[in-house]
Image (cartoon, rainbow, N blue to C red):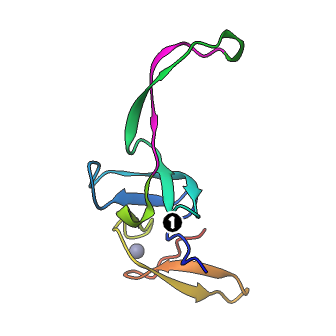
Amino acid sequence: MSVGLRVRKNDQVVVIAGRDRGKRGKVLRIFPTRNRAIVERINMIKRHTRPNPQQNIKGGLVEREASIEASNLMIVCGECDRPTRLRHKRLNDGRKVRICHQCEGVIDK
Ligand SMILES: [Zn+2]
């Protein structure tokens, strides 16, 4: 079975390797089978597009995010504001959440 992605949609992450190292953003989309994710304003690429008046798309160069290896990302804890590894915890109400390895703040609100 797959090991699963470390990141989930809407996670706050920091890039730990590659061209955008040190930048932060929000996870917009994940591709679990490919172990990749798209992160807001990270790994921007320029693309030529054709105009499409019906969809109100102007032609020309458009910047958009390209996917990035999920292993190049690390989750940023919203509580202590540091990149962190995660632990899992079961709350009193039975909910399973991910918590910060360092400050034990709950990542999943
Ligand atoms: Zn923390």
**Among the 4 quarters of the image, the one containing residue 96:** bottom right
Tell me if residue 66 is in the magenta stretch. Answer: yes
Q: Provide residue 105's location: percent of width, then percent of height.
A: 48, 77
Q: Provide residue 46's location: percent of width, then percent of height.
A: 40, 29
Q: Provide residue 24's location: percent of width, then percent of height.
A: 36, 52
Q: Residue at image x 45%, y 82%?
A: 104
Vertical side of 3 occupied by 46: above or below: above
**Among the 4 quarters of the image, the one containing residue 103:** bottom left
The residue segment tinted magenta is 56-67
Quadrant observed for ligand 1 in the rendered image: bottom left
Tell me if residue 90 is in the magenta stretch. Answer: no
* Count of marks placed on residues: 1
Q: Residue at image x 50%, y 55%?
A: 37
Q: Which residue corresponds to mark 1?
A: 7
Q: Residue at image x 61%, y 81%?
A: 1
Give the left or right position of residue 84, taking residue 55 as reference: left
Amino acid under label 1?
Val
Quadrant of image for the C terminus? bottom right
Vertical side of 10 occupied by 108: above or below: below
Give the left or right position of residue 94, taking residue 9 as reference: right
